[in-house]
Amino acid sequence: MLKKKGILHELYTNKILFLMLLPTLLYFLVNNYLPMIGIYYAFVQFDFNTSLFKMDFVGLKNFEFLWKSGKLVELTFNTIGYNIVFIFLGNVLSIFVAILLNDIKGKWFKKISQSILFLPYFVSFVILSVIVFNLFNYEQGVLNTVLQQLGADPVDVYSKPKLWIFFIIMFYLWKNFGYSMVIYLASITGISEDYYEAAKIDGANAFQRAWHITVPMLKNTFVILLLFALGSIMKGQFDLFYQMIGNNGLLFSTTDIIDTYVYRSLRVTFDMGMATAAGVYQSLFGFTLIMIVNAIIRKVNKDYALF
Amino acid sequence: MRRSRMSAAAVAVAMAVFLIAACSSNNDSARPGDADGKSSSILTSRTEGRSGPVVLQFYMLGNAPKDLPIIEERINEMALEDLNVAVKFHYTTWTEWDQKYKLLLSTGRAVDLIFTSDWAFYQQYAHQGAFMALDELLPLAAPKLQAFVPKEMWDAVRIDGRIYTVPSTYKEYVTGGFIWREDLRRKHGLPTPVDLPSFEAYLEGIRQHEPGIQPAAFGSLVDSSIQHAYLEVERKAVGPMPYGLYASYDKPNEIGAYWGTPSHLEDLKKYKSWAEKGYLSKNVLNDPVSMQDQIASGEAAALLSDNPTRYNAMLSQMQAQHPDWDLGYTPFGRSTGYATPVHPMHNGFAIAAGSEHPEEALAFYEKLVTDERYNRLTQYGIEGVHYEVKDGFYHALDKSGFEREGMIGWAWRNPDYMLFEPSYERVQRIFNELDQIQKPDLYTRFVEDYTEYQAERAALEQVVKQYLYPLLAGQIEDVKEGLAIFMEKANEAGLPKIQQSYMKQWKDYLANGIVSNQGEKPQ
Amino acid sequence: MKIKEESSTKWFRLIAYVVVLVGCVLCLLPFLLILSASLSSNASILNEGYHLIPKEFSLEGYRIIFEVPDDVLRAYGVTTLVTVVGTLIGLLLMTMAGYVLQRKDFKYRNVFAFFIYFTTLFGGGLVPYYMLITNYLQFTNSLYALIWPGLMTPFLIILMRSFITSAVPDEVIESSKIDGANDFVIYYRIVLPLSVPGLATIGLFLALQYWNDWFSSALFISDAAKYQLQFYLYNIINTSNFLNSIGAGAGVTLSEGVPSESMKMAMAIIVTGPILLLYPFIQRYFVKGLTIGAVKG
């Protein structure tokens, strides 16, 4: 462990740096660490008339509802599965498009197309769900209107759970890839022209330059996005799932994640303990995962590790 | 060097200013909080309150009317003179209202008066000690109010033997009834829906004659919009009991399981046949458009169930756009033979357990209910500005500033001072009819204590949505098999345990009139 | 132009144009549907669904919202103020933090980075946070309640750290140190100018986060004069959800009536409109900033 004297000495030598960091540290201390006391709610029976630490300790009782439905494994599996796909496809797509965009020379085309690709990020899922219902609903949806005009049978999209795996992923990408694309674009901008010039002289073609220079240079950014995505792998994207699926139980088997499950289950109760318990489960899972992944990254290349 | 140190200092100062300003920011509604809930906040604000008149924090659900500040000012002028109190009205809006309600009552916020209702879990909150008992306070602080509300009503809102809310005395019915497009019925000579068979016959007629119109609209929460409505009209349920339990109004003591029984299967098959015939939309579970909107816009032709007041509102909304359209209404009471007026718990106001000024709060609420000036001002706005009275009826003058009941004052309606729009006659006629067959509400007052089985309860909720909803919406091919799967999953989630406990509580309630207080209620 | 381009470059560019163009169409279509719906009459939306071109042109959605324009206009003001102030303060603090955390000679940078990152993994939940804001910080009904919660995120700090790392080589900092510049001067004179694309990105994200926030209003504001713009959109939607779920069984009638579909869509457009202009504005900073050579030389 670190010695106390060592820290003080270090902080004194770098006092300006430390002062610059101090407001941020204080902010997180107050805004995030202080409320963590509330994790204790997960272990007590909530009571309006006493303070937190005087409530009855109930052990793991608040966690019971997670496995009572017999769905914990399935939910965990769904949640992780979707998020891995999101992380993988999301990054591949945004890196791909960012590289292409960077190479486009038409000034206006570049500007306008960039803005348009970023547009879906502004459409909230509540609004998107209304549009999606209009595309797919059985009686009047755009899809079935077209199908009927073509002489085909209408399709009841809302009763086909497998199909929604695809839709959910598609809507996720549609809405979110613009965000990470902007991050990658900014990173590409930071890559020095010198590398490309040198490669050109060595006779590398455009594809080779993209693959051998741009992609490796984005590794750092990718690792950051990855670590943050993994940390919240058990949370994330509640709105996407909840707004698209709503109360349609037919689709739950493939589209229910921990967050939606907890939300639906706890709507009927106002028990603080159970909600906190679900959060603790998600946090512990993400924490364990991230410690492992970070350790691996540290082993491979220390500079990329988050901490 | 010099410049840099200056800018460093400047930044540091700027940050410090921000932090200090942030920390010491004061505002009109919050009082100094404390580390562990209420205990010490009482001390701090007691001393603070001495300096001037007491400011009551008044919380209401829903959206505030635009002219609320004007009304608040006028109310405060009167309240300062009459009682030496001022009031601050807060509205939660409908966004996250249930979360906020919980947060307000459980985090030591200064709340004096707060709206209560059965659908806002009055019984549970009262049982768990979120509200202050009013029994001793009432005669001291609000004798007039105590006399104004009939004794039966006070008794009806008792939880564990104590009064926790001031009930509204306005008598209305929120029982269900068939709603249908009357102009279409006349056009095609269809039968008038008076009971389920005639309702189905009407839907069939619409399906045949109006292919572009959805015969009936249902909300996406099919357990209330289909199951409970159906049980109300067809099986005379005593109330919308949870967990698939059922008791009839006539024999409430004979409570038993409904889910998984032959009658349940029969009913599910009925819904399935509706879905097959296209009476209800195939995607009812995902439909984001409200039922009312579907009727008013002409997308759908009928509703299985809604209450008289909403029927009237829908009709007015529809006729504003399409004067030649018409809606018909048959209350379920006509086929079931009885109707229950709204339970006094439906609208009320409570004093939060942590309130520091309960006497003042109650005295102010007394004014709000029993003083015509307070009441009219908070229900209809300023006469001559927001509304006028013509031939004894309410006429809006400035709807965007303050609509009728713009402060959502359901709870402090006083029948003596109420003003209605001319169209209210339609509602009144239905109410008069229902008055002839009225019977008391046996169900609402029951307080369920689910401490024992809250894990099972939460788990069951998910099972219901996943396996029962599609059955209710008629989306499962093999109903019998679907029901078997649902029952299996529900039993796994702990349904029998929940039902056992609920039935026992229900029987105790019927036997004693008061739920025995066996559930752990920590002191 | 200059030298003739190799064929691979041409192919590359062709693919780029095609992919980007297809992407643009996919991204634009739903947006156009919303725009068109906001310009349609409510009845035509309900009866005929959404179309790219309004079936029955109508401004009723906008008319209802702007019948009383004060609310929306004031909300614009609140959101703009919160976004500008929050973004500026947040950027200042986060760039400083990012800079410090990437300084290799700052021994405990990883400890502090972990201290910050850890908050993304664990949280106390809503109740304690609500108590923090209302009871301890006492931000209820003040603009601080809108600015404070989103001021800094671990993600943006770490991202900033990485942008600075790649934009400012260690040698530059080393040599400035030898020249006698203190750590803040290095940050102010060298690091900031070199990290312009990173600043623009982080600033953009922070601004968007403030602009899209509605939850802070929902929880901490009960004074209608301080609602954020997005909150109006969510409240319209939630009001109709409420009427759908609770209303029927409970016999709740609202005098204000049910918000219509075209009104929802109009609100969606009103809410997103101005912020769309921010991105093109930010784009100009996505050029190669000052090169390292310029500083070194």
Image: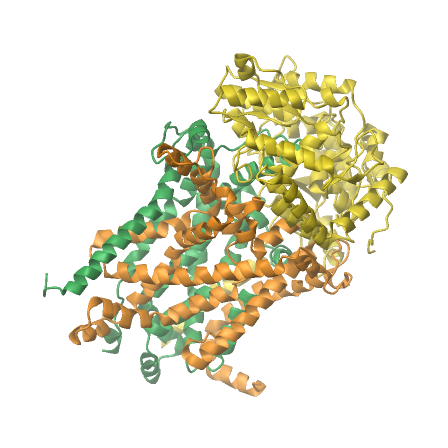
Chain colours: A orange, B yellow, C green
Residue under the point 70% across and 35% down: B79
Is B195 left or right of A74, judged from the image as shown?
right
Q: Position of residue B363 (x, y in %)?
A: 77, 37
Q: Position of residue B465 (x, y in %)?
A: 62, 45
Residue under the point 46% across and 72% down: A20
Residue under the point 19% across and 69% down: A205
Residue farthest toward the right in the current orientation of the protein: B512
Establish if C97 lies above or below A61: below
- In the image, B523 versus A62, the foreground residue is A62
Establish if B505 lies above or below B375: below
Establish if C144 lies above or below A141: below
Q: Image quadrant for the N terminus of chain C?
A: bottom left
Residue under the point 57% across and 32% down: B275
Give the tally of numbered discs.
0
Whether residue A124 is visible to the viewer of this picture, yes or no, is yes
- In the image, B329 versus C186, the foreground residue is B329
Whether residue B25 is visible to the viewer of this picture, yes or no, is no
Establish if B170 lies above or below A190: above
| Residue B134 placement: quadrant | top right
| Residue A224 placement: quadrant | bottom left
Q: Position of residue B266 (x, y in %)?
A: 69, 34
- In the image, B448 versus C77, the foreground residue is B448
Is C103 left or right of B388, judged from the image as shown?
left
Q: Image quadrant for the C terminus of chain C?
A: bottom left
- In the image, B188 versus B359, the foreground residue is B188
Q: Position of residue C267 (x, y in %)?
A: 44, 39
